[in-house]
Image (spheres, helix red, strand yellow):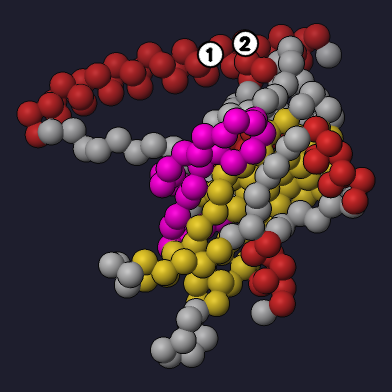
Amino acid sequence: MESDRQLNRWGLTFPQAVINQLRKVGIYGQPQLSLEHQGRAKRYVVRGVESGGATADVGYYVSFAGENGEAIPWLQTLDSLTVNGPHAVVIAPVVTRIEMLRIARTYELCITRHRPVAVEVGHRPKLRAEELFRGVQGYLALELWGKDKDLSGCVRPQFFTRAGEEIELPNGFADAVKAVTSGATCVNCSHPHYSRLVAPPPAAEETEDSDSLHEVATHDGPTQRAEDVDGILAGVVSAV
């Protein structure tokens, strides 16, 4: 259980020099998770705060996904007088934390899954933690905080073994890691990058029109975006 308590507090651990630098530049990520009880629903849920941001030299970001890497809705956003701090509260029965540190173009990543687990009948459950991925000294050549920021949200760093073989991410987590990479390169960040507002379902009489609009958006928007990204990446490769 001691390892669970440690992972529920943080996934990445930093030397004091990194902690001091994050404090100096005003980046305040909150990796800590808590187990909360919903009286009306009569269940326990996991609570986290999407938070963090970046300067040009360093970035630290913490976000949360569902059990299998899917985006989850935030309960509320958090307004602040400062940037690079808390952005949104997320609550779910099972939460996966994606935590990333960036120093220039070098990245560290830790992905951990957290769920309540009953220990004894009639007693408060424990918050169980499971490490899914840990990568150190990952690399991404692009300056997403500067000249390459148009690619933010579309790319992520690569991680390798000591023998130079790429370490694959867990299935389903590519989009979450791309979003957290965007957060760790977002200078003066003031908004969440992966948790999102979920709109209510449309009224019955609007369903047909909404479906038509969705088809148009799906055909034109993402396809064009993909073509734009391919073109930019091709330019980066040719320049290198």
- Nearest the viewer among 71 and 1 is 1
Q: Residue at x 70, y 42 (%)?
A: 28
Q: Is residue 43 left or right of residue 135?
A: left
The residue under label 2 is 231
Query: Is residue 102 highlighted in magenta?
Result: no
Residue at the extreme left of the image, as rendered: 205
Which quadrant of the figure has residue 85? top right
Residue at the extreme front of the image, as rendered: 81
Residue 227's disc is 1
* Percent position of residue 58, x then y: 81, 32
Q: Are marks 1 and 2 in contact (CB under 8 Å)?
A: yes
Q: Residue at x 35, y 22 (%)?
A: 218
- Nearest the viewer among 178 and 104 is 104
* Residue 177 in sight here: no
Q: Amino acid at mark 2?
A: Gly
Q: Amino acid at mark 1?
A: Glu
